[in-house]
Amino acid sequence: MTAATPTLFDTRRSGVLLHPTSLPGPHGCGDLGAQAHHFVDWLVTAGQSIWQVLPLNPVGPGNSPYQSVSTFAGSPLLVDLNQLAERGWLQSMPATDFERSRVDYASVAPARMAMLREAWAGFNRGANAADRGDFEEFRHAQQDWLDDYAFFMTLDERHGTPWNRWPAEFAWREKAALRRLREEAAGEVGFWCFVQWQFMRQWSRLRAYAHSRGVQMVGDAPIFVAHHSADVWANAEQYLLDHGGEPTVVAGVPPDYFSATGQRWGNPLYDWPAMQADGYAWWNRRLAHLMRCFDAVRLDHFRGFEAYWEVPADEEHAVNGKWLPGPGAAFFDALRTQLGPLALIAEDLGVITPAVTQLREACGFPGMRVLQFAFGDTSANPYLPHNYVPRTVAYTGTHDNDTTLGWWYGLGAREQEAARRYLGPQVDQAIHWAAIRALSQSVANTVVYPFQDVLGLDGNHRMNVPGRGVGCWEWRFEWWQVGETPAVELASITKAHGRCR
């Protein structure tokens, strides 16, 4: 392994974790439009220089961005409809009556998709030559993943899920069948490409605006992909599937903090020898794409690259799994050879062995520390701020945790007393500010706070409960909930601890 190249993790700074779907807006969920730009302004006012998001991919089962139909595509739900109307492609913007405090995906998704299809029709009717040229240039530049994604979505709408039960000529990607699809369904294939073009143009515009204001964008890369996805369909030989395309084993984690029966994620597992044989080409394309979109990326479930938990596909829970070796340092060496320095955060939470830590340190990636895991143990607990090292990314909590306020209310008396002794008596008045202040004072170069913690919101506002299939990924806020105090307080803390950029 080579020495780490300086990145945004090497200077003291702080930021906020907020997924764009949580932003306010009139169309049922937050998107990449005006409210996202306004949030950048809020971050600057609050002295923050990082905006971390969850995966921006299309949501999958349970509305999870970690079970997407594509690891390359952006979510159609994040495309700002107002920008399409400004281009004249969307003539009508119907009045909406969506919930403001949560994303009701069952009603929001059909309404937004209908508007996107209307915009596609408007583009075909009235786009100028420059826009048409830009669209075609985008399709050509992104064709290594975009064609497969557009074909997949077209076939998905025709035949449903899962892909391995489609007509055989499409399930197994017969060349003649795909050529015929490209011709016969040109309009539908074009629609899915059009949506991705607009997503990427809007994301690029938002990121450029953030950079102009000194804010870096941090993304998220799930380690595994969904079985019903363009990624698996187009690369089936690189996954552990049977002759019918069904997973023989699936991903998960053993029993841990979040679940007594472990978590059976259900994703197909990689055939690592097959991936190694072609130089990890799919991973190279994936990370190259992510590095073009973000300034740094959180690599989910980093420990799976050292060893992963294999669960038989017919098991209901993850208890009866086993650890198997991952691709290890050779994998990251191969990626670095192709891509150069990798600005990755290693999500090293859960069952972490010395071998996982050794791999992360050899790669030069900062690890994660979560304050909610710090109490009720000894002073040597690695999640206590006095045990951090500079190349660490520290969080009050993550998208999988309760909010800090909800966590505090759920603690037992012994853990509350341990937190009180460590954080000070102010925890009883404002636990969220005590937690934020403790992280900001630490030697960790990078600290990130979920926006719910900055606002001091209780557990009713958490983003996700691991293992729960319904009611997650829905949280939204409105600006009246924010007010002036959080930005002023956060800016004061950030300045005091040398994190202002």
Image (cartoon, rainbow, N blue to C red):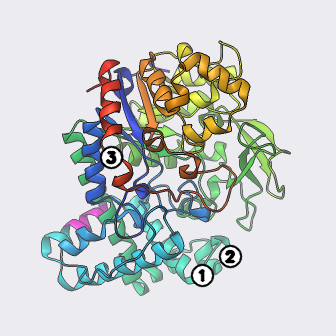
Question: Which residue of the protein is positioned furthest toward the front in this rendering?
Answer: 429
In the image, 89: left or right of 173? left
Q: Marks 3/2: CA distance? A: 52 Å
- Check residue 165 in the rendering and tell me which mark sits there, or answer none: 2
Residue drawn at point x = 44 percent, y = 71 percent: 150
Residue under numbered circle 3: 483
Region in magenta: 134-140
Amino acid bearing label 3:
Gly
Residue 194 image offset from top left, x and y in percent: 32, 71
**In the structure shown, which secondary structural element does the residue marked by tag 1 occupy?**
helix
Predominant SS of the magenta segment: helix
Can you give x and y, in whole percent of width and height, for residue 19 in the image?
43, 51
Dot 3 or dot 2: first in sequence order is: 2
Observer able to see residue 247: yes
The secondary element bearing badge 3 is classed as loop
Rendered location of residue 155, percent (x, y): 53, 78
Residue, x 44% and y 39% (percent of image)? Answer: 297
Image marks 1 and 2: residues in contact by CB distance under 8 Å? yes
Around disc 1, counting alpha carbons within 10 Å, would you say few (fewer than 14), some (14 to 19), or many (20 or more)?
few
Question: For this rendering, which residue is in front, 6 or 454?
Answer: 454
| Label 1 sits on residue | 159
